[in-house]
Each structure stands twice: as structure tokens, then as C-alpha cells.
């Protein structure tokens, strides 16, 4: 294609890019300055819950090393930084009548000031899985609609009041699917509930994930209502939710596998996106679950529909979908990475659920744009190189597969914007640094920065250099010149 014929780029001037993290995965210092426990504190200490038996007590020590972290972000030249606030640092016992912890407020306040002083825009997640343990003990946390919605909204209010003068980008929740399915269905994330009695003494995987998902949606929507009614006018920020969802591709052209792929989209992404953007649960989900899927009252639906200013997207991979199986948590669909001809979809990551397939990212961006018509903020996207943790550091820094991954996704993103006309406004690779990868412990590394856990020293990997020195300025240049990436970096599309 000749440059002159190219469609005009729609990358906005204020396109945000940077890196993402989450409080429990990086902060450590779990018992200082008045913080109380989150559900991950004890869970990660139970034998067998994390792959390497390690927990979040130290993580990347970012609660203490925050100035060094900001210095590195400055060196990388990011425009924005996505991080999360720890609820049990702000309200240690969590509830609406429980005391606020001034030390917790002070820490995030200083952190936000320092970001802004360095010209970095804070992009803040209110809830990235570290529920105050006290709320789980008091009333079973996300399972209790009457309590959790009010407690979450009060926590959100405290954050809007304390930080909203400076924070203009809010995410209410990170990945409700993971909260519900991994925490209350599969039982592999805190609080670890499941029907599997080898895993958990309590729990019901056939009902609890759907109840939790329902209550997470309601909590999100009511926090947004509060923001819009009492803060938006004076603070002028944006607020929305971020959903995980990977592209579901039919295994082959058979009608049953084409239908299976749509079911997979409905059950993972539509479960949350359909109520929030379209005002109803997907028909497939209702049919599969019957009355195990809670209903929203008409009044609740009015609060939920339209309760996100944008579409927050976390996405990592593509699954080939075959009809079959009886796993409701996966829409009764079988996932595979092996094509009918026996070849693999893409490069395998360290974790079993991830292969590199950039065309799927482009397809997902198009699907979400066409279905929901909301501007898209890509709030997570990344890759864990196979066996990176077993390599000597010098070798681990040469993270070729991660560079390839980001080369692919960057091209896919630009093609979606320039050729397909998708409205994308932000890109945050996961993650700024290697960190506590939940049930994987520290075995799986997602960072563009290597963390030496003996010394806590940070070392940029090739992928960080790639994103920062080549692509990010190039994205901005493409935006400025209104041309796609291939015309600026030959051979990339
Ligand atoms: C996301 N899956 O989690 C989270 O938002 C991050 O905290 C996490 O570190 C990152 O992705 C990498 O895993 C996911 O099983 C966890 O499909 C598991 C899945 C997807 C996302």
C-alpha cells in the first residue's frame, strides 16, 4: 500500500502508554503502616497454594523502593503508569464503618504526587484482588451482596476524596472473571473456594462464581454512580472497568465449533461486558445456568447499563475452541492451541494458558469495538518467556520471545487503529517488573524488567528496550505523521 492511499490514523494525540502492576504483586511490606491482611496474605502461605511456596510478604519491595521504581519509569519515558491501591492499606478492616488509615492514604498520596511531578499520569485500579481479609471473615466477602456493595462503594469514596483531585483515570475492578472463576470456582486464587474438596473444605463451583460475578458488577456500577453524581463534575476524570478476555477462535469451520467459539466469548467476556455496555446477561449464559445466574432488578440494571466510560481490555492469547466437555466455567467448550493439522497456534509461554498469536489480538479489538462501540484502553497485555526463571540473569535479559510477542501485538494494535478504524486510546504492557504471579509464585516472570529477588535490583530486559526505545516513540511518530507502523519501521507488518 502506498502511503498516500493510507487511511488517516485515529491514534489520538493523548494516546496513553506505560506499564502496569498491582499492589499485592509488587508492594511487600504487608505489616507496616497500619495495613491489615488481604485474602492473599494467608492464602499464599498455605502449603501448596503457590508453585514455589512463596508469598507476597516482600514481592518486589516496591512499597519501600517506590522512588527507585518511579526513577525507572522516568528512564523508560512512559506517559502513564497503571497501578492498584491496596484496600487493606486504606481501610484495614475494609468495612463502611471501619476506620480509615491515614498512613495508607499518605503513602499513595506521595506516590501519586511523585508520578505527577515527573510528568507521569496515574492510571489507578481500585481493586486488583486484595480484598481485606476481615471482610471475608465477617461475611464471606464478594458472596454477600448486601454488605460488599456498600463497603466497596465506601472504599471507592475514600479514594475519590483523597486522590481524585489528582487521579483522572480510574478502574473500578481488575478482571471480574478471574475474581469469580479462579477465586470461587477453580479455587486456585484467594479465597480458594471450590466444590473440589481436595482443594477447599467449603465452596460450590456451580453457584458461587455467578453470585460473585453479579456482586462485582453491582459494586463496580454503584461506585461509578457515586463518582458521576458526586465527583465527576469537580474532578473531571474517567472511570470504567477492565475485563480479561482472550480471543476465541473456532477450531475449524464446522458449525458446532463456530458456535462453541461464540459461547466462549459470551461466557468469559460477555458475562460482564454485556450487562455493563448492553444492559443484559448473554442469552447463552442464561440458558446454560438457568436460575443459578442471579437476576438484576430493573433498578439495578439502570445503574449497571452504561456504567463504564470506556472498554478496559486485558488480553494475552487466543484459544482454539471445540464444542464439548461439561465445564461450565469454560462455557462447555474445549480449548486447545493445537490446530487440526497438528501445528501449534504460536510460541508457548511459561504458563500453559498462553501462546503468542497477534492476529487474535487484532480480531478481539475488532470484535469488542463492533459489539460495544466504546473507546478501548488496553490495560494489560504481555508474555512470560518459557523457563526464564531457570536461566542465568544475563540470558533472561535477552527475552527474544517476549520481544516477538510485543512486536506482534504492537503491529496488531496499529493495524486495528489505522486499517480497521478501531478507537484505541491506551496500551499498558504487563508488567513493569517481574513480580508475584499469584498461584505461580515467582516462577513465572511477566516483567519487561528483570528483578533479582536476592538484591531487588532491577534490570531492563530487551523487551523493555524494544518497547521504549523503538516502538513507543514510533507509535507517537505514526500518530503525528498519520501513517501506520510499517511505513516508519520497514518490515514490521
Ligand atoms: C492477569 N488465565 O491475570 C492479572 O490481571 C495480573 O495480575 C496477572 O499477573 C497477569 O494477568 C498475568 O497472569 C490473569 O488463566 C491470570 O487465563 C490468569 C489468566 C488470565 C489473566
Image: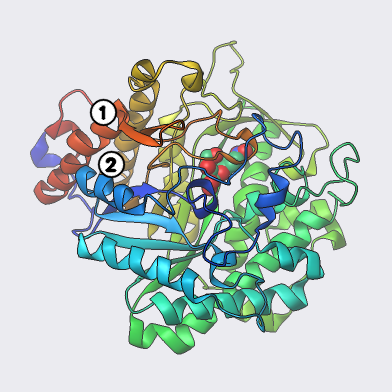
Q: Residue 436 in the image: state x and y as whole percent.
A: 54, 40
Residue density around tag 2, few if under 14, some if 14–19, many if 20 or more, within 10 Å: many
- Total marks in image: 2
Give the residue at x 80% y 61%. Answer: 293
Residue density around tag 1, few if under 14, some if 14–19, many if 20 or more, within 10 Å: some
Among the 4 quarters of the image, the one containing residue 95 = bottom right
Q: Quadrant of the N terminus?
A: top left
Q: Residue 321 in the image: state x and y as whole percent.
A: 65, 31
Give the residue at x 28% y 61%. Answer: 115
Q: Is disc 1 placed on a helix, strand or loop?
A: loop
- The answer to whether residue 423 of the structure is visible from this angle is no
Q: Viewer-proximal residue, 255 or 101?
A: 101
Q: As displayed, is residue 422 above or below residue 390?
A: below
Q: Viewer-proximal residue, 101 or 241?
A: 101
Q: Which mark is residue 493?
A: 1
Q: As displayed, is residue 131 above or below residue 410?
A: below
Measured in 3D between alpha carbons, the distance from the residue under mark 2 to the one under mark 1, in whole angstroms, is: 9 Å
Q: Residue 439 in the image: state x and y as whole percent.
A: 65, 38
Q: Is mark 2 within 8 Å of ligand 1?
A: no
Q: Which mark is residue 228?
A: none
Please tell me which of labels 2 and 1 falls first in the chain. Answer: 2
Instruction: Tell whether 364 sits left or right of 79.
Output: right
Q: Which mark is residue 414?
A: 2
Q: Is disc 2 placed on a helix, strand or loop?
A: helix
Quadrant location, ligand no. 1: top right
Q: Residue 275 in the image: state x and y as whole percent.
A: 62, 66
Instruction: Tell whether 374 sits left or right of 202.
Output: left
Task: Find out whether the residues at labels 2 and 1 contact each other: C-beta distance under 8 Å.
Answer: yes
Q: As displayed, is residue 347 above or below residue 25?
A: above
Colour option used: rainbow
Amino acid at each position: 500500500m502506498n502511503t498516500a492511499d493510507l487511511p488517516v490514523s485515529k491514534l489520538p494525540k493523548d494516546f496513553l502508554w506505560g506499564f502496569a502492576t498491582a499492589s499485592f504483586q509488587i508492594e511487600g511490606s504487608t505489616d507496616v503502616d497500619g495495613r491489615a491482611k488481604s485474602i492473599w496474605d494467608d492464602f499464599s502461605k498455605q502449603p501448596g497454594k503457590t508453585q514455589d511456596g512463596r508469598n507476597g510478604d516482600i514481592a518486589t519491595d516496591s512499597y519501600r523502593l517506590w522512588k527507585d521504581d518511579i526513577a525507572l519509569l522516568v528512564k523508560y519515558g512512559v506517559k502513564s503508569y497503571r497501578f492498584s491501591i491496596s484496600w487493606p492499606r486504606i481501610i484495614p478492616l475494609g468495612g463502611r464503618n471501619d476506620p480509615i488509615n491515614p498512613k495508607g492514604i499518605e503513602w499513595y498520596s506521595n506516590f501519586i504526587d511523585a508520578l505527577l511531578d515527573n510528568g507521569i499520569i496515574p492510571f489507578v485500579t481500585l481493586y486488583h484482588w486484595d480484598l481485606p481479609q476481615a471482610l471475608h471473615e465477617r461475611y464471606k466477602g464478594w458472596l454477600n451482596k448486601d454488605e460488599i456493595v456498600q463497603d466497596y462503594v465506601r472504599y471507592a469514596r475514600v479514594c475519590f476524596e483523597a486522590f481524585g483531585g489528582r487521579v483522572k483515570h480510574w478502574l473500578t475492578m481488575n478482571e471480574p472473571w478471574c475474581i469469580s472463576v479462579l477465586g470461587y470456582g477453580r479455587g486456585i486464587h484467594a479465597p480458594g473456594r471450590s466444590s473440589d474438596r481436595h482443594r477447599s473444605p467449603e465452596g460450590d463451583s456451580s453457584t458461587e462464581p455467578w453470585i460473585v460475578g453479579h456482586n462485582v458488577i453491582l459494586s463496580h456500577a454503584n461506585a461509578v454512580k457515586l463518582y458521576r453524581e458526586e465527583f465527576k463534575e469537580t474532578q473531571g476524570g474517567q472511570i470504567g472497568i477492565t475485563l480479561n478476555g482472550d480471543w476465541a477462535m473456532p477450531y475449524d469451520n464446522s458449525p458446532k465449533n463456530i458456535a462453541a467459539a461464540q459461547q466462549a466469548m459470551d461466557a468469559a467476556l460477555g458475562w460482564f461486558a454485556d450487562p455493563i455496555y448492553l444492559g443484559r446477561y448473554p442469552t447463552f449464559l442464561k440458558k446454560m445456568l438457568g436460575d443459578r445466574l442471579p437476576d438484576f432488578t430493573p433498578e439495578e440494571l439502570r445503574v449497571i447499563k452504561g456504567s463504564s466510560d470506556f472498554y478496559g481490555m486485558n488480553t494475552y492469547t487466543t484459544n482454539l475452541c471445540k464444542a464439548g466437555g461439561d465445564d461450565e466455567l469454560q462455557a462447555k467448550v474445549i480449548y486447545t492451541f493445537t490446530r487440526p493439522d497438528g501445528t501449534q497456534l504460536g510460541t508457548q509461554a511459561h504458563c500453559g494458558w498462553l501462546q503468542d498469536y497477534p492476529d487474535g489480538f487484532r480480531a478481539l479489538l475488532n470484535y469488542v469495538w463492533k459489539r460495544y462501540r466504546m473507546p478501548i484502553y488496553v490495560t494489560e497485555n504481555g508474555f512470560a518467556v518459557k523457563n526464564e526463571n531457570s536461566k542465568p540473569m544475563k540470558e533472561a535479559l535477552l527475552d527474544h520471545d517476549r520481544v516477538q510477542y510485543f512486536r506482534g501485538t504492537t503491529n496488531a494494535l496499529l493495524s486495528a487503529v489505522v486499517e480497521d478504524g478501531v478507537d484505541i486510546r491506551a496500551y499498558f504492557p504487563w508488567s513493569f517488573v517481574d513480580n508475584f504471579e499469584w498461584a505461580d509464585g515467582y516462577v513465572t516472570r511477566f516483567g519487561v524488567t528483570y528483578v533479582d529477588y536476592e538484591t531487588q535490583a532491577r534490570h531492563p530486559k530487551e523487551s523493555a528496550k524494544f518497547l521504549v526505545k523503538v516502538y513507543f516513540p514510533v507509535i507517537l511518530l505514526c500518530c503525528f505523521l498519520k501513517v501506520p507502523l510499517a511505513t516508519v519501521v520497514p518490515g514490521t507488518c
